[in-house]
Image (tube, rainbow, N blue to C red):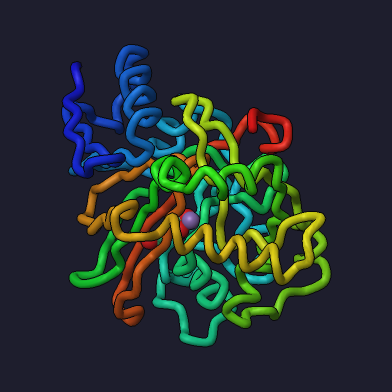
Amino acid sequence: MSITVTPTHPEFVAEISGVDLARPLQPADRDAIEDVINRYAIVVFHDQTLTDHQQIDFARHFGPIQSSAQKARHTAIKHRIASNDIADISNLDGDGNVLAPASKRRLDWLANRLWHTDASFRAVPGALSMLYAHVVPDEGGDTEFADLRAAYDALPDKTRKQLEGLIAEHSIWHSRGQLAVTTYTPEERASLPPVPQRVVRTHPGSGRKTLYVAAHASHIIGMPIADGRLLLMDLIEHATQRRFVHAHTWKQGDLVIWDNRCTMHRARPFDTTKVRDLRRVTTRDVASTLEQAA
Ligand code: OGA
Ligand code: MN
């Protein structure tokens, strides 16, 4: 099978057609898809029909799976999807009903509306996320992506110098705290302590420098918290100018891959009384950003 690649944005984002992801992936297709990911960072496949296991098997071709944080964080509730390899990105409870407005899981999940990159709050963060659409609402619920390599390239020299060597502290509790979602137990908090990550890193697949910032980034280590936080806010504002952003409007059967090492993303609002059932598998980066090229 030979894949067809169609870029859909001047800087990043491409669609791939001509491959059925439910079937065993041929090595040549795997390598071709990896090249497209390295070049475009966001890759869209349409009209796929995948079980959870097929989605996991496909992801495994690109690295070890980062098991979901949700089950560690929500130990007391019933989960709809048993596998730790799938993150349930739906607005459904363990019985398949739409989550109540005040439910803890819904409030936790709302943090996906903030610009972020997956699992930067883990020492070894996320690499590739693969989100698959089972059910999507008629309106709203786009996912937006920002190109952090292009954003880095567009920074003034002076700012790039200023960022050299900086390390941010990332914590999942910081992103939740921004939305005043704070009802976590001491055990939950202790299970995901803050971690350091570089603010600028080299994206291994392209050799390009990229910003590495997110809603989980709280402050810069060694700087007064307020200064570091303002710097991170400025960087996120810079990186999310419309020229660096692409919005994906979901159709059932879409699988979107994004490279967390060089992009940010956020969910957009929709009528949350309607069902939106997306499921994500994420691969793990090779090491902390501190152990990778600056
Ligand atoms: C995610 C995520 C955004 C969305 O799956 O990591 O942030 O639009 N999803 O659901
Ligand atoms: Mn995410």
Residue found 16% across the figure and 26% down from its top: 4
Viewer-proximal residue among 169 and 254 = 169
- In terms of depth relative to the viewer, which is nearer, 244 or 143? 244
The reply, left or right, for residue 215 in relation to residue 34 is right
Q: Is residue 150 left or right of residue 243?
A: right
Q: Point out the image quarter for the C terminus.
A: top right
Q: Is residue 69 left or right of residue 250?
A: right
- Residue 223 x %, y %: 78, 60
- Residue 178 pos. (x, y %): 60, 76
From the viewer's side, name the closer residue of 214 and 48: 214
Determine the residue located farthest toward the top in the rendered image: 28
Residue at 62% across, 72% down: 176
Q: Position of residue 86 (x, y in %)?
A: 50, 48
In the picture, the quarter occupied by the N terminus is top left
Q: Is residue 108 above or below residue 131?
A: below
Q: In the current view of this chain or complex, which residue is farthest to the bottom? A: 102
- Decide if residue 43 is in sight here: yes
Is residue 75 visible in the rendered image? The answer is no
The residue lying at 56 percent from left, 32 percent from top is 202
Q: Is residue 165 above or below residue 33?
A: below
Number of marks: 0
Compared with 74, 245 (above or below) is above
Image side of residue 246 versus residue 224, left or right: left
108 is higher (above) or lower (below) than 256:
below
Location of residue 107 by image quarter: bottom right
Q: Which residue is located at x 53 percent, y 26 percent? A: 204
Nearer-the-camera pick, 229 or 122: 229
Q: Write down the quadrant of residue 179 in the picture.
A: bottom right
